[in-house]
Image: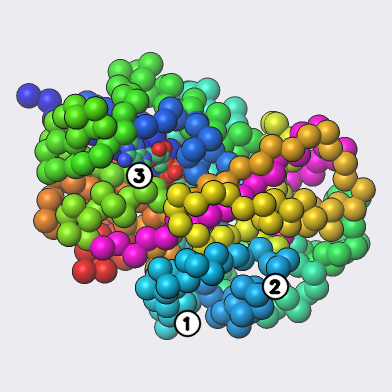
Amino acid sequence: MTEKILVIGAGITGVCIAESLRRAGRSVTLIDRVPPGDTAQTSYGNAGLLAREGVGPILDTGIMLQLPKLLLDPNSPVKLRWSYLLRLIPWALPALRNGFKDRAHHIVTAMNELIYDTVEQHSAIANGTDAAQYIQKGELTLLYRKKSDFTASKFINDAKKAVGIEWEERDLAMLKERDAALGDAYTFGAAYPDHGWLTDPAAYVAALARHFTNSGGTFLNREVVDIGTDRITCTNGEEITGDTIILATGAWSKKLAKTFGHNVPLQGERGYHILLKNPSQVPDLPYLITDNKFGLTPMLGGLRCAGTTEFAPLDAEPSNSPIKLLEKSVKQVYPDLTWESTETWMGHRPTTVDSLPMLGRTKSAPNVIYAFGGQHLGLTMGPKVAQIIRDIVMDKPTNIDLSPYAVDRFG
Ligand SMILES: Cc1cc2nc3c(=O)[nH]c(=O)nc-3n(C[C@H](O)[C@H](O)[C@H](O)COP(=O)(O)OP(=O)(O)OC[C@H]3O[C@@H](n4cnc5c(N)ncnc54)[C@H](O)[C@@H]3O)c2cc1C
């Protein structure tokens, strides 16, 4: 009898896993409460960056020093709903601890393994599908107010160099030579070659999913309310059996993982985007605005500004202040920018305390495999995570050290 694999979650992670396993000849059913490419997915509204340079932990010592200001300043790109503070502390303290140098080195190495060849990985999975049209290759420039803001991140710059990440330094004149519409607020840039981005992340996920179903895979639109070692239960009480069950449920994974005795230190880190439609100017390459923490990405629908971080319960209503901040911040990059209308969006980054995803079989239920925790880079690492999960399903030896992502590492 053919092994039946259930993949729960049809965001970038689940879709890449389902398609990789289908290509390996497996019978795969992909299950989600929303269709692939839906606005409820974090994969819908991200900045679209294939950010090979993003190897650092989500909180490094540089951010830690700024944290009091970041949390108290009303114009800060990091927000906390104070009523959420007590619930955040068990996640925040170890997350801060993991930003210290002694642990951060381990994170840089493990992250690098997942993202060093992201553009090639995306090209490989999208090749021959409609998704391929959304991949763009080109450099990513990190913009800083001044050069000293860049050199202050010495640890992370050294760590990037150590894993072979290169960049070119640009002063304001060089930045303006490339992009005359830039204002004077950001006077220094670090331009990373060999990067890429997606011009419509949601359409990309939807196209990969379409290819998966057109090629024999199955998609079921269901909400999973309970999960066992060989079956899942959906809202209507329907049970679906599977030989292997893969949890690719992003920021919503914590509750399902509790079934297997795991109290995963996973935080839904909320982020926002504004998509500026018919803007007066669009860069031909993306930027990352380092102080206000958002990506500025040329997309098919317009100019997308996506980022900021808000700590609040998973089901809390979106806030208005990150949207206002993004609108204000983009004008600091492009002072003369105008646009016709704005789409706004909020999503949840699935982030563990050590910035690394949870990948592998659970000890208490070896048929259940975790595949979540892509944090700020879940899009970047999607196809590589899928390759790893495919090899785990097939019990194929891998030359990647999987221990940093072990699902039992938090007990
Ligand atoms: C503002 C912002 C900007 C970002 N920019 C980037 C970027 O430039 N580059 C990058 O690499 N990453 C970026 N990210 C991070 C990236 O978007 C995420 O890491 C990634 O989308 C996570 O993908 P996922 O498939 O794991 O989760 P999701 O896309 O959230 O998918 C999870 C799916 O699981 C489903 N699900 C959950 N529970 C159940 C259930 N019980 N039953 C049925 N279905 C269920 C959900 O409906 C959802 O469809 C950004 C994130 C944000 C918020």
Q: Estimate the x, y position of residue 120 in percent, counting from the top left.
A: 50, 43
Query: Hey, what amino acid is under mark 3?
Result: Thr
Q: Magenta segment range?
A: 263-291
Numbered badge on residue 73: 2
Q: Is 334 above or below relative to 279? A: below
Compute the Cα span from label 3 to label 2: 33 Å
Which residue was labeled with disc 3? 249
Q: Estimate the x, y position of residue 199 in percent, counting from the top left.
A: 64, 35
Helix, strand or loop status at disc 2: loop
Q: Residue visible at 21% across and 41% down?
A: 226
Dot placed on the residue nearer the N-terminal end, 1 or 3: 1
Helix, strand or loop status at disc 3: loop
Helix, strand or loop status at disc 1: helix
- State the residue in front, 142 or 258: 258
Compute the Cα span from label 1 to label 3: 31 Å
Q: Does the residue labelled 3 lie within 8 Å of ligand 1?
A: yes
Which residue was labeled with disc 1? 101
Q: Does the residue labelled 1 lie within 8 Å of ligand 1?
A: no
Q: Does residue 371 appear in the picture of this structure?
A: yes
Query: Hey, what amino acid is under mark 2?
Result: Asp
- State the residue in front, 183 or 222: 222
**In this view, which residue lies farthest toward the front?**
83
Dividing the picture into quadrants, the one containing residue 212 is top left
Dot placed on the residue nearer the N-terminal end, 3 or 2: 2
Compute the Cα span from label 2 to label 1: 27 Å
